[in-house]
Amino acid sequence: MPVTTASYFDTYQFEGKAGQSVMIRMDSKAFAPFLMLLGPDGKKIAIDENTPNDDYAAIAQQLPANGTYRLIANSRAEKQKGAYTVSVTPLILLRHGELATGNRKLKNGALYQDYDFQAKANQTIKIVTYSPDFAPYLVLLNADGKVIDESRGSAHDKDSASLWITLPRAGSYKVAVMTQKPGAEGKYSLMVQ
């Protein structure tokens, strides 16, 4: 845990509700950021220990209780300092899942799972999926099952896929997470914000 007596850190608070999903992000060009989330009871809920980049830290978390949450904004190494920003963004959907034998399959053998969410007309959303185990593929469908948009990871970022889109109508939408390669399996995270 980077919070030590030789470490500079700041604390922030925000109000949260049980079941609410949030994305917490800390960005800095001056040092490698580190985040820790403490619950209303003061116990550690989450830390950012898996962000692959050195210029940001992120935690996507479903809050377990109503109350005041604390963030500890720190650096990954001791005595680092400089400018940074911290943001807390509510999420429409947050899921952590696993594609494995027993999941539904497409005709080509690729495994998938899908999730429903509600959105407003002309709402701009960002959908992101990340997997340390497989190259993900995202598909967004409307309530009629028609594909609205889709995304594969880029050549330089094969472990994630993302979509930015302004939705045409209010109502139900479905997002599907699948593997690009038939037979691939593994864990993933999915966020809609």
Image (spheres, grey):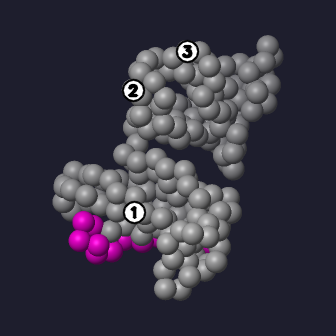
Q: Which residue is mark 1?
A: 175
Which label number is shown at residue 17? 2
Q: Position of residue 129 (x, y in %)?
A: 52, 58
Q: Amino acid at mark 1?
A: Val
Q: Is residue 42 above or below residue 123?
A: above
Q: What span is in magenta?
A: 142-155
Within 10 angstroms of label 1, few (less than 14), some, or many (20 or more) residues? Answer: many
The image quadrant that residue 14 belongs to is top left
Question: Residue 37's quadrant in the figure?
Answer: top right
Residue 92 visible, this angle: yes
- In the displayed structure, 51 sits above or below 174; it is above
Callout 1 secondary element:
strand
Give 53 or 31, whichever is nearer the viewer. 53
Q: Amino acid at mark 2?
A: Lys
Q: CA distance from mark 3 to mark 1?
A: 34 Å
Q: Residue at x 27, y 67 (%)?
A: 142
Task: Say left or right for 106 vs 17.
Answer: right
